[in-house]
Image (tube, grey):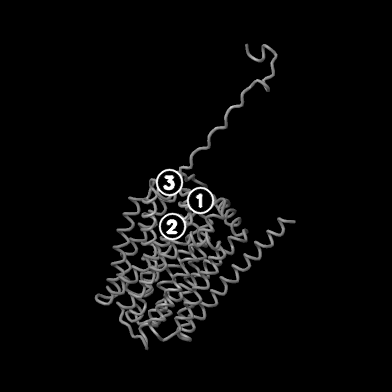
Amino acid sequence: MSPASTGASTTLDAVPSPAAPAAPDSRLTPGGPGYRRMSFALFLAGVATFALLYSTQALLPLISDGYGVSASDASWTVAAATGGLALFVIPMSALSERFGRRTVMTASLAVAVTVGLLVPFAPSLGVLVVLRGVQGAALAGLPASATAYLAEEVRPRALVTAIGLFVAGNSVGGMSGRVITGWVAQEWGWRVAVGTIGLIAVGCAVAFRLLLPAPQHFRAGSLHPRRLLATVRDHLANPLLRRLYAIGALFMTVFGGVYTVIGYRLTEEPFSLPQGVIGSIFLVYLVGTVSASTAGRLVGRLGRRGALYLGGGTTAAGLLLSLADSLPLVLLGLVLITAGFFAGHAVASSAVSKTATHGRAQASALYQSAYYVGSSAGSTVGALAFHASGWSGTVGVGLCAVLGVVTITALGTLAARRQILADAH
């Protein structure tokens, strides 16, 4: 008989059912299926992004000579690309929320490489700057969508490492683009050099699309402007995210200024280096590849703020060393600047993805927007400072930016301590 027919208590006689087992975490993890394909695909996307974005940076002295313009005028070929990316990264991130990360990244690369094949035929500096602006706007679909893709498809413990590998791809793209353009331009001119980068980017884009696994955890969002604005306001209201955005911008101000101007410095006395050798200087980007890919271990040992202090201190030491008129010391300075920048960037960008609890694409887009505004500001202000005061002026701009990084990080430390005290009370 059932308990109801006997009058027995169902509370005493019922056997509790076992709790349903938790669903296994199907997100990607190092060593698991699909992780290597995903890592290599996004690595190639990072290579293509930075190779295209900064394809003219090492060639600025030749572009100045070719069009008969000053260093500050030629620097707009870099500032236009990074500025276009900064302006369009938030709208592109919104599209990725609606149409998917992989779709937007693929379309962005397709447009960017197409424009890259047109850049060598620019008849004037004005046309070149416009093409570079369009190219930067197209590339805006990559950074925020890539970090959002990783935040959704990779387990949290592996997120810093995965984003570090994407940033490492950025460093390889920046390095290879500058080294290749330097040697090619020395033999055949800057137009052939940027055309070569365009062809390399085509290969990276095709391989990226073939290798990147289809997203398994993406959920389409809304393109409603009010919801987008509300999400952006939420992120900007978060003090930690605001600090991370400012840190990314300031780190990139240093990096953009140094690498926009270094070619001019090395062509002058006492160095007088040829274009091919100047391009090879950018092999120091390999240091950035290592420092970005090890950012996860650095955070594990020092914590996020400790890693940012170390990145800022290393960058400042490199800036001071680069003031010497000794080529080995200048190279050592560039190594330290590059290592400090890429470590700081990987730590800050991964912290954004972890901090945002919703609208991750917009959170990453705001970081990327601030980051590339810093790049545009650094390339323009760094070139103006070089024109006015030489290399010491560019270094002064960089040291001010590093001081801002350290100050903001210190304010974060104080805010965290106050929160701990408040929780204790």
Name the residue: 46% across, 45% down.
27
Q: Earlier in the sequence, mark 1 or mark 3?
A: 1
Dot 3: element: loop
In the image, what residue type sits under mark 2? Gly
Give neighbour class at mark 2: few <14, some 14-19, many 20+ (Cα, 10 Å). many
How far apart marks 1 and 2 lie (CA) works out to 23 Å
Residue, disc 1: 156
How far apart marks 1 and 3 lie (CA) works out to 16 Å
**Residue 397: x percent and y percent?**
51, 78
Name the residue: 52% across, 59% down.
300
Using the rendered image of the protein, determine whether residue 95 is visible from the camera's viewpoint. Answer: no
Disc 1 + disc 3, Cβ < 8 Å: no
In the image, which disc is placed on residue 141?
Answer: 2
Give neighbour class at mark 3: few <14, some 14-19, many 20+ (Cα, 10 Å). some
Name the residue: 48% across, 49% down.
155
In the image: residue 85, left or right of residue 235: left
Q: Quadrant of the C terminus?
A: bottom right
Residue, disc 3: 215
**Residue 4: x percent and y percent?**
67, 14
Using the rendered image of the protein, determine whether residue 139 is visible from the camera's viewpoint. Answer: yes
